[in-house]
Structures are given as C-alpha cells and as structure tokens.
Image: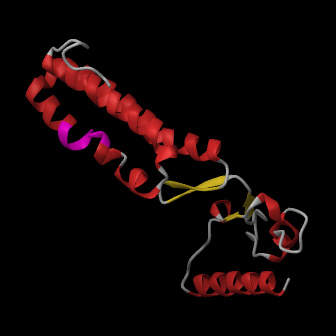
C-alpha cells in the first residue's frame, strides 16, 4: 500500500507541475497497465483510482487495463490475442493504402507508383517500429499480411502473374 501511495503522490506532483506550466492533462489517455494477477490484492490499483487526479470538469481519471495497451505504436501487456490485434492494425492500414495507390496508377504511371511503393509503402518500413519492438510470434502474421499487400502492388506494377511474383 505504501508503494501505491507513493505512485499516487508522484502522479499528483506531475499534475501540479504540469498545471503550473499552463498544461491541461487529457485524463482519457491516462492508462495504468496492471497484470490481472493483482486483482483483489493490496496492489490492485483499481482500489486507489479515486485517489489519482481527475479532470475537474468531466471527473475523468485514469483507467486500469489488464490485457494490453499500445505505447508508441507497440503493444505491451499480457494478453497475446490483444497484442496480436494491435499488431495487425498497421498491416491492415498498409493494405488499404496499397489499394488506394494502385487505383492511382493509371493517372500517375507505373514508375511513380513504383517509387512511392518502394519508399513509402515497403512493409519493412511501415512496420519497422513494430517489428523491432515486439515478439516475433506477435508480428509474424502482420508482417506476412503487409508483405503480401506490397507484393500484390508490385505484381500490378510489373504486370506479373501470381506464378511470376508469388506472395509467399
């Protein structure tokens, strides 16, 4: 309990210092990631949520998350399913962007489409942060999906068949 009180004091000190600088916290974004094994123990942070600072108008405060949360674009936590879902988001976005770029190819030409695909839509570039900071068993499917999207775009640019430029 003493450790939890110290965390709350740090949080209050941060809020006070931030307010003195003219800052206003977005309490919706305050997430506390805690392992589910702590539920019901003296370390269960949900027992102390009312002690944390809250928005004076909306009364919003920190939220406890027990499975996983995205931090700087990378999933952290304990629930493998949640982390896999978070990792798939940028791969799905890349798939959509490749389809949009492909739709512009008749107007901008194959060379410009290839240049954009090569430098801005490369799977290793788009997923670089995720791939470097997550476990391979979490990122394998998203990496494959992203690579397949890029390959499909390159196949279109090169007028190649699936046999000539396979996805895997």
Position above or below: 159 against 5: above
The color scheme shown is: secondary structure
**Seen from this angle, which residue lies furthest left?**
111
In this rendering, position of residue 161 left or right of residue 31: left
Indicate the position of residue 98 as horizontal and vertical percent values: 31, 29
> Residue sitting at 68 percent across and 85 percent down?
10
Indicate the position of residue 22 as horizontal and vertical percent values: 55, 81
Position above or below: 50 against 15: above
84 falls in the magenta region: no
- Quadrant of the rendering where the C terminus is positioned: top left
Indicate the position of residue 119 as horizontal and vertical percent values: 19, 43
Q: Nearer the viewer, residue 154 or 141?
A: 141
> Residue sitting at 82 percent across and 65 percent down?
38
The quarter of the displayed image where residue 102 is located: top left
> Residue sitting at 74 percent across and 56 percent down?
66
| Count of numbered tags | 0
Indicate the position of residue 120 as horizontal and vertical percent values: 24, 42
- Quadrant of the rendering where the N terminus is positioned: bottom right
Mainly helix, strand or loop, the magenta region? helix
Position above or below: 144 against 86: above
Q: Nearer the viewer, residue 123 or 51?
A: 123
In this rendering, position of residue 100 left or right of residue 57: left
In this rendering, position of residue 121 left or right of residue 93: left
Give the magenta-colored segment's residue range.
Answer: 118-123
The quarter of the displayed image where residue 56 is located: bottom right
The quarter of the displayed image where residue 77 is located: bottom right
């Amino acid at each position: 309990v003493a450790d939890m009180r110290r965390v709350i004091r740090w949080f209050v000190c941060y809020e006070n210092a931030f307010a003195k600088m003219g800052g206003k916290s977005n309490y919706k974004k305050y997430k506390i990631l805690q392992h589910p094994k702590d539920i019901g123990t003296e370390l269960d942070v949900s027992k102390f949520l009312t002690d944390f600072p809250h928005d004076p108008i909306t009364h919003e405060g920190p939220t406890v998350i027990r499975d996983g949360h995205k931090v700087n674009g990378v999933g952290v936590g304990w629930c493998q399913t949640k982390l896999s879902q978070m990792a798939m988001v940028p791969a799905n976005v890349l798939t959509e962007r490749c389809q949009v770029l492909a739709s512009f190819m008749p107007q901008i030409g194959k060379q410009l489409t290839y240049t954009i695909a090569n430098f801005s839509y490369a799977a290793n570039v788009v997923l670089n942060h995720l791939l470097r900071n997550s476990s391979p068993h979490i990122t394998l499917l998203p990496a494959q999906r992203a690579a397949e999207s890029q390959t499909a775009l390159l196949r279109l640019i090169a007028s190649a068949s699936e046999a000539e430029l396979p996805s895997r």
